[in-house]
Image (cartoon, rainbow, N blue to C red):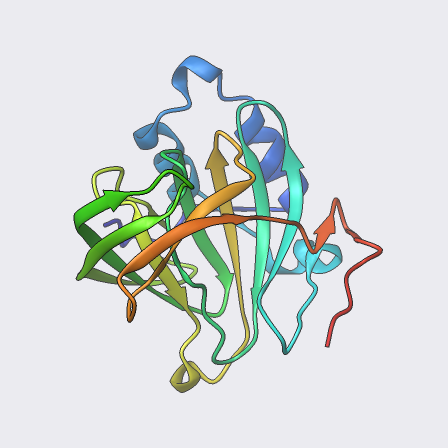
Amino acid sequence: MPSRVASEQLAISDWVRNLSSIPARDFSLGNVQDFVMRYHVRPESLDKYLHFSRGCYTRNLIFKNELFECMAICWEIGQFSRVHNHRDQNCWMSAPIGRLKIQNFRVEDRHALADHSGTCKLVPTDIYEMNSANPVHVNPLEPVHQVLNLAEYNQRAVSIHIYSKPFDSCEVYQLEKGTYGDVPLHYTSEYGKLNPDEKLL
């Protein structure tokens, strides 16, 4: 995975505008990864998208079109995602604030049921640390992963995620039970405005 510092800092509005200028035919895993390595989001430009909750990490939509969506995910100390996939879509991640651990998994012995659930075995594989100097992307050959803001990091974190194309559900895996199933996704806030049904703790 890449480990060099992004060479230019941009406000999130300019960052999204430049990202949107990449033609659909060129919106490839490598090209977008080059973009997130070259351009770093200025943390102070994210203020209106930052909503933290002690109950769970929050998903805050910044931009969305037919090709991709971009969001800020806010993590309190010790919060982590469930083990999940991205519906066969590409994903790029950076952490302009704090740092996060990425744990990848290999799926073995997958047996699907009719209701979009099933059983499988998960084998932990690569581990990465994501921070302002080290953006990462999800390996299409090993897309199941977990994101963790470890308690030992002792700081909040904010990660920027690009998904291409957007999706509104994903598969969530339960390591202990060896099962997986569909889970719908929602936004905590959209374009800087908190969704009315959200109650942040």
Q: Is residue 103 visible?
A: yes
x, y (%) of residue 194?
A: 79, 56
| Residue at figure coordinates x 42%, y 41% from the top left | 115
- Horizontal side of 194 relative to 14 (left or right) equals right
Residue 132 locus on image (x, y percent): 43, 60
Residue at image x 69%, y 56%? 188
Residue 158, quarter of picture: bottom right
Toward the viewer: 118 or 66?
A: 118
Pick whichever, 112 or 162, lies toward us. Answer: 112
Q: Residue at left 40%, top 37%?
A: 87
Front position in the image: 45 or 138: 138
Tell me: residue 138, above or below residue 44: above
The answer to whether residue 113 is left or right of residue 69 is left
Task: Name the quadrant containing residue 76.
Answer: bottom right
Q: Is residue 184 left or right of residue 139?
A: right
- Quadrant in which the C terminus appears: bottom right
Horizontal and vertical percent position of residue 162: 49, 40
Outermost residue, front direction?
Answer: 114
Residue 134 visible (yes or no): no
Please tell me which residue is depicted at 64% across the width and 49% down the height of the picture.
186
Residue 149 point in image, percent of width and height:
44, 73
